[in-house]
Image (spheres, rainbow, N blue to C red):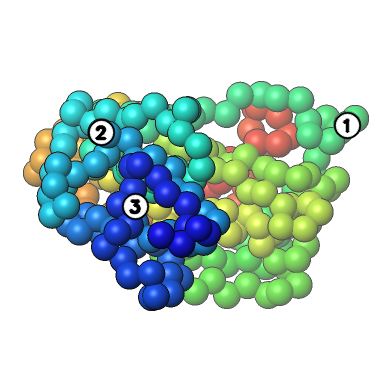
């Protein structure tokens, strides 16, 4: 045996001819375990619980309760590739409705802000609005100068948006220094594009706002809501009517759809 090749009692390298150069990467094959060594590099001992019963042994898929993670604290060197669990211990928790609460202003000394007139509820009907957005359309056509305008005066780093049609609050974060009109529109669009899933059927707040033909907590109802998104909660009112003040502070605004 070559003096520069380290030996390890837990690794068998006798089947690999010494004149062949080592492969660039170690190979991990479930049905034919192989271990490749390089000069001056010792492999970590293989824990007994991870070794196949025979060189040609097959790995069996175990349930979550049968998997035991070995104690690797005393093993030196690089550990073996981690095991990935094949099943979760339990289903993920249901989605809970998050209600905003009044908080101090994000900007020191600011207790009231003025909304950009283009975003004000009713501005378009009175002839003063420049935004006409239908969130059901695939493309929103708004002038770039309007999109870049600050949404509030003074500007805020984020705004929380609520709607009587939606059991979720939406948050618009500033893409630059302050939240812009474009940030508001993009935040609403992203939230309305979120699909409705099976977990929503178990939430009473969500159930009360689901379309009438989907408000049953059973498999048939879930099949009916497949393909629906939060946009369907708006009951066909997909155009932006504007924003109005809420009773929870200058950082939280109500979105109106028409």
Image: 114 above or below 201: below
- Quarter of the N terminus within the rendering: bottom left
Closer to the N terminus: mark 2 or mark 1?
2
The residues tagged by marks 3 and 2 sit, at their Cα atoms, a distance apart of 42 Å
What residue is rendered at 71% in x and 29% in y? 249
Q: Is there any visible trace of residue 40 in the rendered image?
A: yes
User: Dot 1: within a 10 Å radius of its alpha carbon, few (fewer than 14), some, or many (20 or more) residues?
Assistant: few
Mark 1 sits on what residue? 108
Q: Where does residue 36 sit, x and y in percent of width and height?
A: 38, 60
| Mark 2 in CB contact with mark 1 (< 8 angstroms) | no
Residue 223 appears in the figure: no
Residue at the image position 60 percent from the left and 44 percent from the top: 171
Q: Nearer the viewer, residue 188 or 239?
A: 188
Where residue 180 sits: x, y (%)? Answer: 73, 57
Q: Which mark is residue 195?
A: 3
- Callouts 1 and 3 close, C-beta under 8 Å: no
Residue 210, by quadrant, is top left
Which residue extends farthest left?
220
- Residue 10: image tag: none
Nearer-N-terminus badge (1/3): 1
Q: Which residue is mark 2?
A: 49
Which dot, 3 or 2, sits closer to the camera? 2
Q: What residue is drawn where x is 21% and y is 50%?
A: 225
- Please tell me in which quadrant of the rendered image residue 64 appears: top left
Toward the viewer: 194 or 19? 19
Q: Earlier in the sequence, mark 3 or mark 2?
A: 2
Front in this rendered view, residue 152 or 226? 226
Secondary structure of residue under mark 1: loop
Q: Is residue 6 left or right of residue 181?
A: left
Q: CA distance from mark 1 to mark 3?
A: 37 Å
């Amino acid at each position: 045996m070559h003096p520069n090749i380290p030996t390890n009692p837990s690794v068998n390298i006798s089947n690999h001819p010494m004149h062949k150069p080592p492969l660039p990467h170690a190979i991990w094959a479930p049905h034919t375990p192989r271990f490749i060594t390089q000069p001056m590099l010792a492999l970590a001992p293989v824990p007994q619980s991870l070794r196949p019963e025979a060189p040609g042994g097959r790995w069996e898929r175990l349930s979550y309760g049968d998997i035991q993670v070995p104690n690797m604290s005393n093993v030196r060197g690089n550990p073996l590739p981690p095991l990935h669990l094949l099943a979760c211990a339990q289903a993920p928790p249901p989605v809970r409705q998050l209600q905003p609460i009044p908080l101090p202003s994000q900007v020191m000394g600011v207790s009231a802000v003025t909304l950009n007139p283009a975003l004000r509820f009713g501005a378009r009907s009175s002839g003063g609005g420049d935004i006409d957005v239908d969130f059901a359309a695939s493309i929103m056509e708004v002038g770039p100068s309007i999109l870049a305008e600050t949404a509030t005066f003074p500007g805020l780093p984020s705004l929380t948006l609520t709607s009587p049609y939606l059991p979720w609050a939406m948050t618009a974060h500033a893409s630059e220094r302050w939240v812009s009109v474009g940030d508001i529109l993009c935040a609403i669009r992203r939230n309305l594009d979120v699909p409705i899933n099976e977990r929503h059927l178990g939430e009473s707040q969500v159930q009360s706002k689901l379309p009438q033909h989907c408000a049953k907590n059973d498999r048939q109802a879930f099949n009916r809501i497949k393909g629906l998104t939060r946009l369907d909660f708006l009951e066909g009112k997909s155009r932006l009517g504007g924003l109005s003040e809420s009773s929870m502070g200058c950082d939280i605004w109500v979105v109106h759809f028409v």
